[in-house]
Image: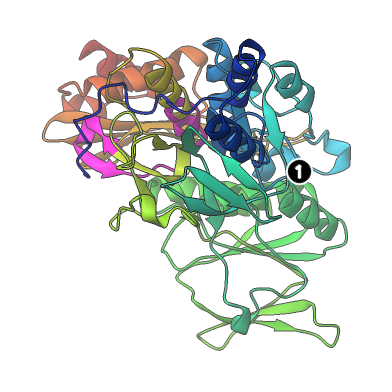
Amino acid sequence: MATMPNTMSIKQGLSLWCPQSAVLNRISRVSVPSRSFRRSFVAASSFDNENREYVVVGGGNAAGYAARTFVEHGQANGKLCIVTKEPYAPYERPALTKAYLFPLDKKPARLPGFHTCVGAGGERQTPDWYKEQGIEMLYEDPVTGIDIEKQTLTTNSGKLLKYGTLIIATGCTASRFPEKIGGNLPGVHYIRDVADADSLISSLGKAKKLVVVGGGYIGMEVAAAAVAWKLDTTIIFPEEHLLSRLFTPSLAQKYEQLYQDSGVKFVKGAKIKHLESGPDGRVTAVKLEDGSSIETDTVVIGIGAKPAVSPFDMVGLNNTVGGIEVDGQFRTNIPGIFAIGDVAAFPLKIYNRIARVEHVDHARKSAQHCIKSLLTAHTHTYDYLPYFYSRVFEYEGSSRKVWWQFFGDNVGEAVEVGNFDPKVATFWIDSGKLKGVLLESGSPEEFQLLPKLARSQPSVDIAKLQNASSVEEALEIAQASL
């Protein structure tokens, strides 16, 4: 970790820069401003943002929850500016690969229905909400440059923005296939924002055959939505089973069977050579390295994401996990600059390692922790418990809805309990301690137990878990060990 300066006499991140409103108040009390004051006022007036005390770069989940926290502490009105490349106010991004992709007759999600912070039970922060709170929103204008010494940002349109404190919440960008192998062909899609999802929906409405590249979260969720469109769907991935970073082979097999029962085909352990196109330039097939090809008219690439660090590379990157390196309060090694959400490489206290987490839960919690630390005497180190989930096949008419949650770390020996009808649970035991747990189709009370187990890491009798006759019995055994 980069060391943090210890010579500052004030709380790091609190701005010493005087906002324009304060300057105007002083003018009203001074009859003849000095020549040097007039020069500084002219310079301040040359900036393109009115709210300059706090600037958030990025318009995703983290930005929305940061805005809410600023409002809760009375520090948003006239002080906070959010700069985003999107034309929309921050929204709950996970919806884009879930309910947003449902066919029109399956009641798909649409904005403004999933603006932040509805995903965590909070208020729906529409564009009008930001206006009412006195938050300045700069839409469709990504930041392209930063001058750390002058504390200014430049945007794609040429705006010059001033900041007192900067919060980087740029998230990630979708990993793409190179253009030379067909990564930009018409009919090839990536999903990261509303425009991407809208483009995909337009293709799904005309598609007959869909190929999904990638066996992770994106691949599983897009393929499940494609079943509702009644498409001939194939998932291709290089691993031996679905979601190999988390699922055990046995657990993956159960989910794969569920997809196959819905008509989805799998091509495992496959590497793609290139995408082929027809006379009109649109994708027509996926060519594999073994010489075989799979016909298609629509392709979705879901092979991961990269932290969107540009143009903030000079702030300090972590070369191991990627992203911008921060401490337990999301401070970078530049005083007054913070990074939150997917782009932040932070100390994962519970496991004593540096991590970068691409998940909505971390985006929300990191934003809240950072802003509280910035605005109050809150000095606790961020203590995050890794959490992942997925919800698929939740559209009307689906014969089986899937919702699983995982907490903790998937290390050690895995013990699986249950027959997936509908429940199944997997416990990861390392050196006699429960490190992680995944549960499918649990009750609200059972899901609430999972983080308690994963955070406490109790000693568990692995033989008792292995002999449990049901998921309920296994959870009781684990709970009794707390």
Whether residue 159 is visible to the viewer of this picture, yes or no, is yes
Residue in the foreground of this view, choosing between 367 and 480: 367
How many residues crowd mark 1 within 10 Å: few (<14), some (14–19), many (20+)?
A: few
| Amino acid type indicated by mark 1 | Pro
From this view, report whether residue 201 is shown above or below residue 377.
Answer: below
Whole-percent x and y of residue 177? 57, 72
Q: Judge from the rendering whether residue 192 lies leftward or rightward of residue 418; answer left or right.
A: right
Q: Judge from the rendering whether residue 70 lies leftward or rightward of residue 475; answer left or right.
A: right
State which quadrant residue 2 falls in.
top left
Residue at the spot 69% in from the left edge and 16% down from the top edge: 133
Mark 1 lies on a secondary structure that is loop
From this view, report whether residue 101 is shown above or below residue 65.
Answer: below
Q: Judge from the rendering whether residue 388 lies leftward or rightward of residue 452; answer left or right.
A: right
Magenta highlight range: 347-366
Residue extending farthest left: 431
List the residue tagged with mark 1: 87
Q: Judge from the rendering whether residue 297 lies leftward or rightward of residue 372; answer left or right.
A: right
State which quadrant residue 458 falls in.
top left
* Total numbered labels: 1
Residue at the spot 30% in from the left edge and 32% down from the top edge: 436
Whether residue 245 is visible to the viewer of this picture, yes or no, is no
Residue in the foreground of this view, choosing between 134 and 48: 48
Whole-percent x and y of residue 196? 72, 54
Quadrant assignment for the N terminus: top left
Whole-percent x and y of residue 204? 81, 57
From this view, report whether residue 138 is shown above or below residue 271.
Answer: above
Colour option used: rainbow
Residue at the spot 75% in from the left edge and 22% down from the top edge: 131
Residue 77 magenta-highlighted? no
Residue in the foreground of this view, choosing between 237 and 113: 113
Quadrant assignment for the C terminus: top left
State which quadrant residue 263 falls in.
bottom right
